[in-house]
Image (spheres, rainbow, N blue to C red):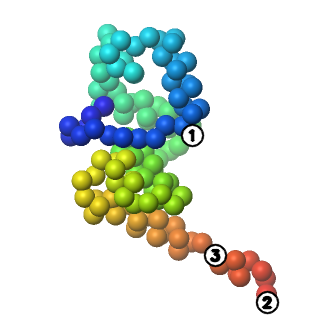
Amino acid sequence: MRQNHKDRLTILSHSVLNDLRTYFKEWKPKHYLFEGAKGKQYTSTSILKIIKNAAKKGGIKKNITPHMLRHSFATHLLENGTDLRYIQVLLGHSSTRTTEVYTQVAINNIKMIKSPIELLNLD
């Protein structure tokens, strides 16, 4: 789905690619990879319902939105050492300032890291 008329790039794991191939062979979509009713594009409301249903099935009580998944994706990439400029490209941000929001989340997590010296019990 194109948001704001921008193409979005993403990464795809081999296991997900294999699942998508299986899905494609079984469902044989015509125009969209994931087609809604009568082969139409899913609406944003339908996508929201799918995500909320998946969260409920997973026992997640927090109110989950598609945009939260996007934030989580970016935050996990940053926490795993992905360069901010690459995250910017993946998210389709034209400015690094927009992407820099995720550095604050990572900094908050960094504050919780304990020094290995603290773990030595030198008391």
**What residue would you read off at disc 2?**
123
Q: Quadrant of the N terminus?
A: top left
Contact, CB < 8 Å: mark 2 with mark 1?
A: no
**What residue would you read off at disc 1?**
59
Q: Return the x and y of residue 101 as percentages of the image width and height.
A: 34, 62
Q: Is residue 93 above or below residue 34?
A: below
Q: Return the x and y of residue 26 as percentages of the image width and height.
A: 52, 11
**30 to the left or right of 56:** left
How far apart marks 3 and 1 lie (CA) works out to: 30 Å
Pair 3/2: label in front: 3
Q: Return the x and y of residue 22 as percentages of the image width and height.
A: 55, 18
Determine the secondary structure under disc 2.
Answer: loop
- Residue name at image x 30 percent, y 47 percent: 92
First in sequence, mark 3 or 2: give its number.
Answer: 3
**Foreground pick, 37 / 110:** 110
**What residue would you read off at disc 3?**
114
Q: Is residue 123 above or below residue 80?
A: below
**Foreground pick, 48 / 18:** 18
Q: The residue under label 3 is which amino acid type?
A: Lys
Callout 1 crowding tier (Cα within 10 Å): few <14, some 14–19, many ≥20: few
- Residue name at image x 79 percent, y 87 percent: 122
How far apart marks 2 and 1 lie (CA) works out to: 41 Å
